[in-house]
Structures are given as C-alpha cells and as structure tokens.
Image (cartoon, helix red, strand yellow):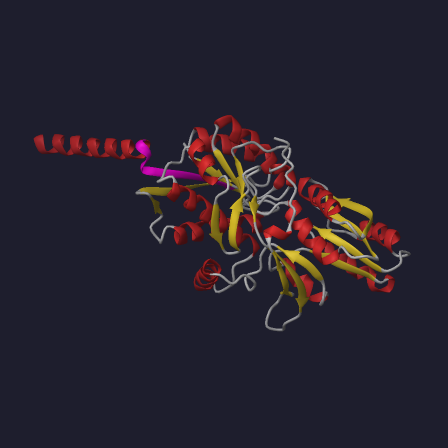
C-alpha cells in the first residue's frame, strides 16, 4: 500500500515537474498555420517539409535551442481567411504558441496580421507574397522570409523592361495577383503596359481572357509579351493554344513549383526571374537541403521547400541569439536587421518593415530531356543591393 501511494506521489511529482518545466520555458512552441488542404495544398506541404528539415538542420538534429525543445503545432487553414484567423488566435491563446509561421495564401495572411498584434506575438510570414503584408497592413509583430510582390516584380522587370516592348499582364483576382501587378507596374520604367487582365482563382477556361489580351497586343509594334502572375490551380499557359505566335506574342512569367514548370517546356528561351530553383544557388545550406531532400524523397527540393527551410533558419538563428528567449519584444529587437543563412544564401530582415532582403535569379528556360519540367538556366543572380524594394508600410 505504502509502495503504491509512494509510486502515485512520485508520478504526480514527475507530471508536476514536467508541466512546470514546460511552463517555465522548457519548450519553444511554434504554430505552423498553412494550407495543408485547399487550393494551395501543394505549396503548403512543401513549406511544412522545408520547415521541419530546416529546424532539424539548424539545431544539428537535436530540435533543441538553448536547452529548450522545439515543438511544432500544425494548423490547416484550408486557404480560408476566417479559418486562418481563428486558428492563429487559438494557437496563441490555447496552445500557448510562442510564435507562429505561415500562412500559404496572401488572403489568409492579411486576415491573420491583426491577430499577431492583438496577442503581441511574432508571426513569421512564409510564403504569402502580397506587398500589403509588409506594407500598409503591417504591424511590428510581422516578419517575412518569403519574397514579396515587389521583389518578384523588380526582378522580372530586369528580364522584360526594355525599350520597344509592350506588355499585358494576366493575374488572379485577389491580393497576390493585384499586388503583384501593381508592383510590376511600379518596377517597369521603359516598356509599355497596355492591359491588365484579372481572372478568378478558380479559372480553368482562359479563352475569353486570352482573347482580350490578344486584342490589346496584336497591333502593337515591337516585342509583345503577356506577363503571367498565377498561383495554385488552373493552367494559364493554355493561352498559348490560341496561337499567340501568329501575332508575335510571347509569354513570360516568374518561377514556380516543378509540376507547374512542366508547361515551361513548351517555351524554350522564355525569360523571367525566380525566387528559387534547386540547381541555382551554390552554398552549404542549399547543398544540405538538396542532399537531405533527395535522401528522403528521391526528388529535388522545390520552390516552397526552400522557403520553409529559410523560415526555420531565421527562427533558430534568432533564438540562439536570445538564448532561447521567445518573448516578442526580445525577438523583435534581435531580428530587426538580423542576417541569417538560407538555401538562397544570406537573407537580412530590413529594420523598417521586417521584409527579408534576398537574391532573385534571372533565368532562361532550357529544355533538357532528363527533366520533366523546363529547366531555368541562370542568366545572373540579382542581389538585394540591386533591387530598390519600396518600403510600403508608412509607419
């Protein structure tokens, strides 16, 4: 009887000690709110894979920082803004998350920003792209490792902004598409933009939109380009079926996930700028990511895998500097102006708006029978110092 009582007491003490350990900061709890399902599911899953690989790499396989265990809490926002907002609130309030990473969709991110401010906890945005996230909707708890629309736009303008070029844009009718086109227009200084075509995110038949684009471009002199900004479902490259070559119209776009780049094989020589392609950056972090991904999945890491990995590198770098202190005030002070290594090389959080300054890659598509996608061959790396990325937060 005494033994049983003592055993219960010891177990109670152990449980109490474990709870106290957790409450005293024995864990660093990170909520990852992302599109595990929904229209951007492919992007979300890549981000999650990259995040976990990155945390493992950055902590030397221990999943510990400053003696504290990293615990990742997954939340599926399904690409729905209201759901993302409530999940983030639940993560901060109920799950006691110290900070959060995500989401996948720009629309969801914009709904989540005020929640981070309300709970006074960090939200590290990866990979949502809209400029407004670190622009007019920003608050001091928001950091972003993902590129923003301006970085996409400025780097793509490097490839397309030439005298005698006329451009029409094709984009999705929501924050990602509209912010992307606005940033692209701001970045283009020499070429002429004659039309903006916005289509619903669920579009599968591009015929009507393509006809409007053709009508605006076909009689223009010089080089004629349709610049596509598209994410998720639907294949806007189907517009090539309308025999654009007959009118001398080219297609251009930025990088994308490898399955989407299968359609790039139809456009050898197409130029653009990308955020990441596994064969381009030459640095130890990218080598580690590529090797680990091949080992685990027998495939190369993709566009958003690198982003998830980068977010992990940022978080662990900051927590090492704070000796495991995950309080927002400490992290903000530490992360502003902080540089950290990623698969893309060094990134730096700009102090003014917490946007990660990073390289982009000007490419030309090459068809290689060894790959089922169009291979982006590097023309040149566009360094952060070459991109005058506007500060749009008006703070």
Res. 205 in view: yes
| Residue with the most extreme top position | 118
Q: Which residues are magenta?
A: 24-33
The overriding secondary structure of the stretch rendered in magenta is strand
**Residue 359 position within the rendered picture, expressed as x and y whole percent measured from the top left:** 58, 54
**Residue 33 position within the rendered picture, expressed as x and y whole percent measured from the top left:** 51, 40
| Most foreground residue, 115 or 274 | 274
Q: Is residue 301 above or below residue 172?
A: below
| Most foreground residue, 182 or 51 | 182
**Residue 34 position within the rendered picture, expressed as x and y whole percent measured from the top left:** 53, 42
| Residue with the most extreme right position | 219
| Most foreground residue, 224 or 341 | 341
**Residue 4 position within the rendered picture, expressed as x and y whole percent measured from the top left:** 12, 33
Res. 1 in view: no
Q: Is residue 171 magenta?
A: no
| Residue with the most extreme bottom position | 369
Q: Is residue 208 above or below residue 363?
A: above
Relative to 98, 113 lies left or right: right
């Amino acid at each position: 009887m005494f033994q049983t009582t003592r055993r219960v007491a010891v177990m109670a003490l152990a449980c109490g000690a474990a709870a106290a350990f957790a409450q005293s900061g024995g864990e660093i709890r990170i909520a990852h709110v992302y599109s595990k399902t929904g229209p951007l599911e492919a992007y979300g899953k890549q981000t999650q894979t990259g995040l976990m690989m990155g945390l493992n790499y950055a902590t030397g396989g221990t999943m510990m920082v400053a003696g504290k265990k990293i615990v990742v809490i997954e939340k599926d926002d399904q690409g729905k803004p209201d759901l993302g907002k409530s999940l983030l609130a639940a993560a901060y309030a109920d799950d006691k998350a110290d900070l959060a990473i995500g989401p996948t969709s720009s629309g969801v991110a914009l709904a989540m920003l005020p929640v981070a401010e309300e709970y006074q906890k960090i939200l590290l945005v990866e990979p949502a792209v809209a400029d407004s996230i670190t622009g007019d909707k920003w608050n001091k708890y928001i950091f972003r490792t993902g590129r923003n629309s301006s970085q996409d736009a400025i780097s793509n303008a490097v490839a397309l902004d030439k005298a005698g070029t006329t451009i029409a844009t094709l984009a999705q009718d929501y924050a990602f598409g509209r912010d992307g086109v606005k940033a692209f227009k701001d970045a283009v200084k020499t070429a002429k933009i004659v039309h903006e075509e916005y289509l619903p995110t669920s579009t599968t038949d591009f015929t009507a939109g393509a006809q409007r684009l053709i009508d605006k471009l076909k009689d223009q002199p010089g080089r004629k380009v349709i610049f596509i900004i598209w994410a998720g479902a639907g294949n806007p490259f189907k517009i090539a079926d309308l025999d654009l070559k007959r009118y001398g119209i080219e297609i251009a776009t930025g990088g994308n996930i490898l399955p989407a780049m299968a359609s790039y094989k139809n456009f050898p020589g197409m130029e653009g700028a990308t955020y990441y392609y596994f064969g381009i950056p030459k640095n130890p972090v990218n080598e580690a990511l590529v090797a680990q991904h091949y080992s685990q999945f027998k495939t190369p890491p993709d566009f958003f895998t690198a982003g998830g990995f980068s977010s992990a590198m940022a978080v662990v770098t900051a927590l090492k500097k704070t000796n495991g202190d995950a309080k927002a005030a400490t992290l903000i002070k530490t992360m502003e102006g902080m540089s950290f290594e990623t698969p893309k090389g060094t990134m730096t959080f700009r102090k003014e708006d917490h946007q990660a300054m990073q390289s982009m890659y000007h490419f030309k598509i090459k068809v290689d029978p060894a790959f089922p996608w169009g291979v982006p061959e590097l023309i040149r790396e566009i360094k952060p110092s070459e991109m005058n990325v506007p500060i749009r937060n008006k703070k």
